[in-house]
């Protein structure tokens, strides 16, 4: 009984030890799994932080680039010139208008609208010049508007100059009053002049080279081909509106006036083209004496090869052209053959070949003799 009890006791202890070992291993495995999960989560957080930091850096860089682009666009020479011109125009109006108001109101309060209308007319006419350029109005319209602008600006400048001179009796010296009058007159004229220069620059910068070339081409057409242009205009005016393009009308008018359907060609030019073509063909065709010399030279080259061919022929006996068909002569009359004789047969090599010189001469004769197909 005691031995069995001790064995069972040892077995229980061994089982308890094994169970504790298994529990410890499982606990260690769970701890390692939690550690791996924590490490992976920390790695993901670090990666996310790096990504967010790079994204923020890229966003800040993009914002800085955008601000730099806006500054660059705002500080272009074109924008500076346009905005600066408008600023000078505003300063000119603010400087010239008060003196005119004081002058006319001093005469009578009812004259207050006169300086406003005078200054406004100058600027409206200046805007009219820009509008005429945009609409491609005739040149006389633009110059008329410019003349009106110059007249209004000159009248306003004279008033401001007189007002400046009138300040000499109000505590200013004569030189200072003259300087004030000249400054008011200059600033009055400065605004319209600067605005007109701005319009000229914009018009010249906006012109297209292709459009300029087209205008030059149209001017040359009008100068060089007046009759064709007159007929083309009549064709366009006779056709329904928009149905006959200008280039088609020009081609038809050219054919009506000159004859050839290709624009630029006239009967005189057609005759010169035909004569030039004939001269070219004559220049490309060799003369008969040149052909004869060439044939003689080619025949001579082949004839010089006769001794070599003769020597070769001496080494090898020549075969007769045909086999002898006549029987040898004899004193006695031959007896009639019992059966019909077999006719001779042609064999390869029984006739000599034609010489190469003969081939050259035959080829030259065939080339110089017109064939039936060529004559037809």
Image (spheres, grey):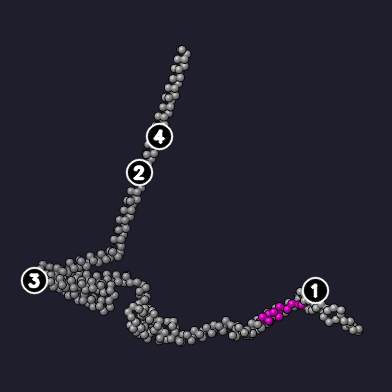
Q: How far, Cα to Cα, is label 4 from label 3? A: 98 Å
Badge 3 or badge 1: first in the primary sequence: 3
On whether residue 355 falls in the magenta region, the answer is yes
The residue singled out by tag 2 in the image is: 49
Q: What stretch is highlighted in magenta?
A: 350-364
Residue 316 is tagged as 1
| Residue 38 image-quadrant placement | top left
- Circle nearer the viewer, 3 or 1: 1
Q: What element carries label 4?
A: helix
- Which residue is drawn at the image coordinates 30% and 56% (left, top)? 67
Q: Mark 3 points at which residue?
A: 109
The residue singled out by tag 4 in the image is 33
What is the C-alpha distance between the residues marked 4 and 2? 24 Å
What whole-number distance in Å separates the C-alpha atoms at marks 4 and 1? Answer: 109 Å
Q: Toward the viewer: 77 or 334?
A: 334
N-term mark: 4 or 3: 4
Quadrant of residue 290 in the image? bottom right
Name of the residue lying farthest toward the front: 338
Q: Where is residue 357 in the image (x, y as percent from the top left)?
A: 71, 79
Frontmost of labels 4 and 3 is 4
Question: Residue 33: x percent and y percent?
Answer: 40, 34
């Amino acid at each position: 009984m005691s031995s069995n009890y001790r064995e069972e006791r040892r077995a229980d202890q061994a089982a308890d030890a094994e169970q504790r070992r298994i529990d410890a291993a499982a606990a260690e495995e769970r701890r390692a799994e939690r550690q791996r999960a924590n490490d992976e989560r920390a790695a993901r957080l670090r990666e996310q932080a790096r990504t967010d930091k790079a994204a923020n850096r890229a966003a800040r860089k993009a914002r800085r680039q955008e601000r730099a682009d806006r500054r660059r666009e705002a500080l272009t020479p074109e924008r500076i010139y346009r905005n600066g011109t408008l600023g000078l125009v505003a300063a000119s109006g603010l400087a010239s208008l008060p003196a005119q108001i004081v002058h006319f109101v001093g005469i009578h309060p009812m004259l207050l609208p006169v300086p406003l209308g005078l200054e406004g007319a100058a600027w409206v006419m200046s805007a009219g010049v820009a509008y005429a350029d945009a609409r491609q109005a005739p040149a006389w319209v633009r110059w008329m508007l410019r003349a009106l602008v110059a007249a209004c600006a000159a009248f306003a400048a004279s008033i401001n100059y007189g007002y400046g001179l009138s300040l000499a009796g109000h505590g200013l010296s004569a030189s200072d009053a003259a300087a004030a009058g000249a400054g008011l007159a200059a600033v009055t004229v400065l605004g319209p002049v600067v605005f007109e220069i701005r319009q000229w620059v914009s018009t010249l910068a906006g012109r297209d080279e292709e459009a300029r070339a087209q205008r030059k081409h149209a001017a040359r057409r009008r100068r060089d081909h007046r009759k064709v242009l007159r007929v083309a205009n009549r064709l366009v005016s006779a056709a329904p509106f928009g149905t006959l393009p200008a280039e088609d009308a020009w081609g038809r008018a050219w054919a009506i006036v000159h004859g050839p359907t290709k624009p630029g060609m006239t009967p005189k030019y057609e005759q010169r083209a035909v004569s030039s073509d004939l001269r070219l063909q004559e220049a490309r065709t060799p003369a008969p004496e040149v052909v004869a010399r060439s044939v003689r030279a080619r025949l001579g080259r082949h004839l010089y090869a006769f001794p070599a061919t003769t020597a070769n022929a001496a080494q090898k006996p020549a075969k007769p052209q045909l086999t002898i068909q006549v029987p040898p002569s004899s004193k006695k009359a031959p007896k009639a053959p019992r059966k019909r004789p077999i006719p001779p047969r042609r064999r390869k090599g029984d006739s000599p070949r034609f010489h190469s010189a003969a081939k050259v001469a035959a080829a030259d004769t065939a080339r110089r003799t017109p064939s039936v197909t060529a004559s037809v």
